[in-house]
Amino acid sequence: MARHNELGKEGEDAAAAYLEKRGYLIRHRNWRRGHLELDIVAVHEGELVVVEVKTRTNTDFGNPEEAVTPMKIRRTVRAADTYIKFFDIALPVRFDIVTVVGSAAPFTIEHIPDAFLPPMF
């Protein structure tokens, strides 16, 4: 596996552990349906929380959350809609971003709740 792929997996592991320590129940990690993917899907305080994880070795080229583009948001919302229908979930939904920065653990982690809203199509 290429180093950037390994770092991405380590970042997602760190993000999931971070969320679990804060009381989030992880339902799925790297959930896929066709070409759609969700990094982390969790439940916290009666909400379904869809988490986009962005891992970077440093912030030399900008903050990790800046990589969550309008196109990425549309794809994430579409994937979340598919997930909700597939599992017949009747909870309010929130979209968060967790950023993970560093080349190895311990990482610097930032959790951005309600990072974006679903766009109007």
Image (cartoon, helix red, strand yellow):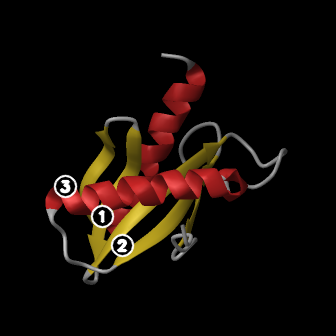
Q: Is residue 112 above or below residue 39?
A: below
Q: In the rendered image of this protein, does residue 2 appear above or below residue 55?
A: above
Q: Is residue 63 left or right of residue 65?
A: right
Residue carrying label 1: 42
Q: Is residue 91 above or below residue 82?
A: below
Single out the residue that lies furthest toward the left: 88
User: Contact (CB < 8 A) between labels 3 and 1?
Assistant: no
Q: Which mark is residue 86?
A: 3
Q: Residue at x 36, y 69 (%)?
A: 49
93 or 110: which is nearer to us? 93
In whole angstroms, how far apart are the C-alphas of marks 3 and 2?
Answer: 27 Å
Give the Cα distance between marks 3 and 1. 15 Å
Residue 28, position in %: x, y? 26, 51
- Tag 2 residue: 22
Residue farthest toward the top in the current orientation of the protein: 1
52 on left or right of 4: left
Which residue occupies 39% across, 44% down?
Answer: 37
Residue at 45% x, 60% y is: 77
Amino acid on which the number 3 mark rests in the picture: Phe
Amino acid of disc 1: Ala
Chain-order first, disc 1 or disc 2: 2
Q: Quadrant of residue 55?
A: top right
Residue type marked 2: Arg
Residue 33 rendering spot, x and y as whole percentages:
29, 40
The disc, 3 or 2, on the residue closer to the chain's N-terminal end is 2
Q: Nearer the viewer, mark 3 or mark 2?
A: 3
Q: Position of residue 57 (x, y in %)?
A: 69, 40
Left or right? Give the position of 2 relative to 42: right
Mark 3 vs 1, N-terminal side: 1
